[in-house]
Amino acid sequence: MIINKEINGNSAVIKPEGWLDASSAPEFSAALEGLESSITELTVDMEKLEYISSAGLRLIVAAHKQMNGALTIKNVSSEILSVFRMTGFDKRLNIV
Amino acid sequence: MTRGKHLKNSAQRRIAVISVVLIVFTALLMTLFSWLYYTRFTAESCTADANKFRETFSELESYIDYGSLKPSEGDVPKEEDVYENFRTYLKRLCAASGTEYIFMFHAKKDEGKIRYIMAVADDNEQDEIVRKERSYNTEVMIEDYSYINKALDGELAGPRRVSNEFGRVLTYYFPVYNNEGEITCITGIDFNVSEVSSRAMGYVIRMVALVTGVLTAVLIMLLIVLRKKIFKPLRNLAVQMNSFEPETEHVRLDLRSYYEIEEINNSFSKMSDDIAGYIVNIKAMEHERTQAAAELDIARRIQNGMVPLKCSHSGRGYDLYASACPAREVGGDFYDVFESGGRICAVIGDVSGKGIAAALFMAMAKNMIKNRLRSDLDPAAALNFANNELCAENPEGMFVTVFALVLDPSTGEVVFANGGHTRPLISGKDGSRFLSPDSGIALGLFEDSHIINEFTVLADGECITVYTDGVTEAVSVNKELFGEDRLQSEILPGSAEETARSVSDAVKRYSEGCEQSDDITLVSLRFTRSENFVSELLPCEMSSLGRMQSRLMELADGYENKRMIVLACEELLVNIVTYSGSEYIGMIMSREDDRLTVRFEDSGKPFDPLAEPPKEKDFDDYDTGGMGIKMALQLSDTRRYSYISGKNIINMTFLLS
């Protein structure tokens, strides 16, 4: 999968494209781990994300932890939103 | 037979006839002997008289010279008065001696005729007649001249029996000598025997009548006794035998007869009692037989009602054909096919024994299995349940072998359980193979039978045929069994009906000419995969995920929720890859219209992902996972897990939209 990163000072935007499943999760995980420790705010732009499985959801939770809650999800497709809803993540995540 | 013939052949008649013949014969014999005796007696007595007469005549001759009466040419010899004197003396002699006639004549040896000198008769009337007819020189021809020849030789000749106009007489001849001792003439004397004969005859008749009378009386007495003591009792016995009714009680006749007849009477009494006993037994047997027939009829109706002779059914992904060919006697074979929860259940069984007990046991077993199988779709559970129930209520110690299977027409998966039944045959275009199920144990014998589930997966067009031992144990005229090998070689590919018929027809051909000894029951069930069908054997690693995803996307192409289904499947696959330790993952994905069926099979650790939903966690703890399975369950329409033969099997269906 393709993961675009944009960093503006202490905030970063990650744009995963394609499928975030168990096999691509390590890439996404690597991308998260690759963020500078100075970054305190993270936005995941899901505009081009077609698919997310529990492996991806786990990384979202991990990122949420890493940012101490300063995680924003944006451009969520209805299908992915339904996955968040299924797990109840929509109540805990800042989805815009 | 007419009464006349009866009479003709009756012993009474025979005895009567023989008696009459005997009496007549005796009478005749007596008459004959008497006659012979009296004839001889008369002759002897007459001969004695004749000898006496001859002596008297000889003495008389010393006074009257009859010898001087020589033959002469004249009508009267000597002087007429002398002749008359001679004649008078002779007549007196005739009266005194008791002879009938006395006559004197001249004769020469072998002359054949005599010339009368004189003849006198005792009776005056007769005397006058003979005076004229036998006058001096009357010549008479004599046929039998031997007596006269004998007299000419000097002997007393006679008696000669003569019957002539003068009556029945015995005649004696003796010669008369002159002074020179020459025979000058012959004297004949006739003794009248008519009177003696008639007296003798009267005596004989009286004698014969007396003897005959006595004999007749004795025989009549004998007949009366025989009639009273033998024939009448026999007739009474015959009448009783003739009117013998086994239903009515036998009363022994009071015959008052002889031992032999009483023996017959006793034997008949005993026979009557025996027959009455037998009739009672026969009636009881007949009653039992009728009852048994009625019972058999009920059993047959139960069987026919519960097990139709044929049944065919088809639906998406399958077609089935079942047939039952009951033997003459009602057996306990049954089959059952039904659909439940989108899956096809087939059960076949064979109850031990025959008759109504077997039919009822069959009905019980069939219903128990059906009810349980319909709700659980778990063959082993159904058989174990039925086994426990049957064991609890089985006073007759009956048992039933059962094979139960459940086909998933989406995937071809067949889950089956065997309770001691014959092994099924799987046939397809590429040949056939016997399934080798766990033998299990017949239901109704032991509690805790521990019958287990097993499974197989049918390829496209493969047909599983379950049957009872009536198929493999069908007997030919040569007393050989049909057997599994012949079954395998005779079974033909085709629809379920064609497959089933190929078997039943082969069995029918094989056992042609033999009475069918056992029910022949079989069920064929064919699986036909849908056009959208994918079967994959994947290595148990994360790299398999992509392949699965792409196949699913192809199958669900055009449906909006395809990614949600992929999500659910990914969660399960990842779970298997991560935790099972299996070497492979077998997958079947099949779509029919808006329904997608996915089947996972792995040989890893038993793990039922459906058993317990993962505990709710704190949001921040979800980074270690725990939501995948939950999502998968939520996304599926139906799901089922089973652990069979060391395999984890997950079946899930999804509704496409």
Image (cartoon, coloured by chain):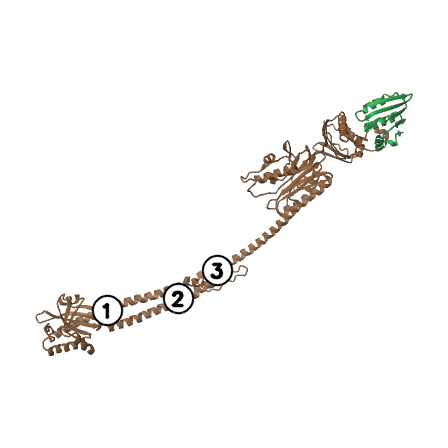
Q: Measured from the top left, where is residue B655 in percent x and y?
A: 78, 35
Up/down of B20 relative to B640, above or below: below
Q: Residues within 10 Å of mark 3 (few under 14, many from 20)?
A: some
- Residue that carries the numbered disc 3 in the rendered image: B266
Query: Which label's residue is closer to the chain start, 1 or 2?
Result: 1
Query: Is residue A87 found left or right of B386 in the rendered image?
Result: right
Up/down of B241 relative to B557, above or below: below
Q: Are marks 1 and 2 in contact (CB under 8 Å)?
A: no
Identify the colour of chain A in the image.
green
- Element type at marker 3? helix
- Residue that carries the numbered disc 2 in the rendered image: B222
Up/down of B343 relative to B298, above or below: above
Query: Which label's residue is closer to the chain start, 3 or 2?
Result: 2
Is residue B502 among the parts visible in the rendering? yes
Identify the colour of chain B in the image.
brown
**Residue in view at x 61 percent, y 34 percent:** B488
- Residue that carries the numbered disc 1 in the rendered image: B41
The chain letter for the residue carrying disc 1 is B
Q: Quadrant of residue B639?
A: top right
**Are the numbered discs 1 and 3 placed on the same chain, yes or no?**
yes
Q: Tell me the quadrant of the picture where the C terminus of chain B can be found.
A: top right
